[in-house]
Image: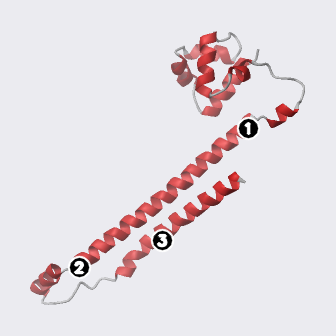
Amino acid sequence: MEIGNKLSQLRKLSGMTQEQLAEKINVSRQTISKWESDSTSPDLESIVKISRIFHVSLDDLLREAQTSVTNRNDEQITLEDLMKINLHNRKMTLLFIGGLIFVMVSVLNFAHIMALQSTTLSTQYMLYRYIATGQYDNAPIDYMRLMIPSIIAGAVGLVLFISYVIENRKKGD
């Protein structure tokens, strides 16, 4: 039986160490190492736990590899396919989170500038400036120049979101 090889592949695909898997199954790391090298075989209870941890049916976990190539084997996802899917999902998550961060920075920057503009145009501020400097007008601030980082951050966030949506549509096709 080649359960050791399957166990090793599933563990590596999920990014777990032997020690992490051993903790989940309540065995030692050395036991996992022996199972993966096919020195020993896991007991039934451990096989069931492995099946649940990796979301693999007991049949797929215990069944020996078939030597004949059938249509069913052509339809199965290989380990390389799963690794590519995992990598793609990680990239898509980073793309989505990056877009979200840029949009949030843009919104916060915009809100800060609007609060600053409101403050500088308030009557109290104009009276303070009149008393302190003798000028009775609003503060000479170019608000559009302050908005440039907000606009750039928002544009980057929108580009990342659009890329995320396009990639999801391609994946769906």
Q: Which mark is residue 152?
A: 3
Determine whether label 1 and label 3 are within 8 Å by CB: no
What residue do we see at 51% from left, 69% from top?
155
Query: Is 5 rendered above or below residue 91?
Result: above
Q: Position of residue 172 (x, y in %)?
A: 69, 52
Tag 1 secondary structure: helix
Q: Amino acid at mark 1?
A: Glu
Tag 2 secondary structure: helix
Q: Amino acid at mark 2?
A: Thr
Q: Position of residue 41 (x, y in %)?
A: 68, 11
Query: Is 75 rendered above or below residue 56?
Result: below
Q: Position of residue 102 (x, y in %)?
A: 47, 62
What residue do we see at 55% from left, 18% from top?
25
Q: Quadrant of residue 38?
A: top right
Q: Could you tell me which quadrant the C terminus lies in?
A: bottom right
Question: Crowding at label 2, few (<14), some or many (≥20) Cα neighbours within 10 Å?
Answer: some
State the residue lying farthest toward the left: 131
Is 42 or 76 nearer to us in this picture?
Answer: 76
Q: Amino acid at mark 3?
A: Ile
Q: Position of residue 49 (x, y in %)?
A: 58, 19
